[in-house]
Image (cartoon, grey):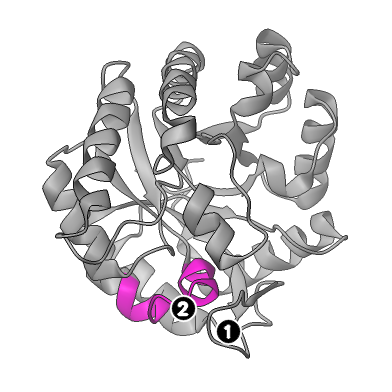
Amino acid sequence: MSASLAVCSWSLRPESPRDLVDKVRASGVSAVQLALGPIRRGEWDETETVSLLKDAGIEIVSGMMETAGEDYSTLETIRETGGVRPDATWQENLAGAQLDAELAARIGIRLVTFHAGFIPHDRADPEWSKLIGRLRDIVDVYHDHGVRLGLETGQETADTLIEALDALDRPSAGVNFDPANMILYAMGDPNASIATLAPRVVQIHIKDANRAATPGTWGAEVPVGTGEVDWAGFFAIVGERLRTCDLVIEREAGDDRVNDVIKAASVVREMAGWIERDAPG
């Protein structure tokens, strides 16, 4: 099985399915991780979206589930509002997961990723058992529709995430590894973390960042190749242990997203040449 080089649909800030197709083409890649929210909410027509991507030869490698009420203003607000941890949005998020799982199954998506929310480092924290129980419910919803679930990295250390996955005891749950998030959340060295998590990684986000100058505040996301991710070391590990994982470019800052994706794709092609060498045809 060969890996694909893709881009996150939300990174391109598309205004419509047609606009997404145009921007993916302009980015020079032929695959996408698709945000499911616009289709689930009825903002985009499901049939039109799938048909336009298929006709353009753009593969959908995975989906992304949004959770309600998230506020990324500060580390503290995302800790309070992120993922499925908040009680106020739990039922809404469980219902959203059901709809996204049905949607993913209908259009042939076999992997969906999302942010679980901050997983406590201490198992004695009462939030631990609550969050693990909710994650089991979410994973089971997707599993019932033949879809795997990837938990985004960054909001906890690699060791905490492994402990949580072991507690979940759900083989269909894995990790969507994002090296920049490890830096943005100050949760460990990206290369050491991916080496630890490798057996659980089901997809990789390609994103770069610089650490915060002030502890307890956000770092800064920057174009791939200009931040603190050691890409040579990173791709050495990926090439040895995760060669079949799709590499999905994510860009959530800046005003020139298409060109930033083009530059990121160039870095990937230079350092992860197997992406094209292993491609069929």
Instruction: Check whether the beta carbons of the residues at disc 2 and disc 1 lie within 8 A of each other.
Output: yes
- The residue lying at 46 percent from left, 62 percent from top is 274
* Between discs 2 and 1, the one toward the N terminus: 2
Q: Amino acid at mark 1?
A: Arg
Span colored in magenta: 179-193
Residue 63 locus on image (x, y percent) = 52, 33
User: Is residue 169 toward the left or the right of residue 164 in the image?
Assistant: left
Q: Magenta span has 188?
A: yes
- Farthest residue, direction bottom: 213
Q: Secondary structure at mark 2?
A: loop
Quadrant (top left/top right/bottom left/bottom right) for the N terminus: top left
- Up/down of 13 relative to 59, above or below: below
Q: Element at badge 1?
A: loop
Look at the image and tell me whether residue 108 can be seen.
yes
Residue 59 magenta-highlighted: no
* Residue under pointer 1: 211
Label 2 CA crowd tier, 10 Å (few <14, some 14–19, many 20+): many
Residue 276 seen in render? no
Q: Residue at x 25, y 25 (%)?
A: 140
Residue at (41% x, 76% y) in the render: 190
Q: Nearer the viewer, residue 185 or 234?
A: 185
Q: What residue is disc 2 on?
A: 186
Left or right, 151 with reference to 38: left
Residue 229, how many percent across, how many down?
Answer: 53, 80
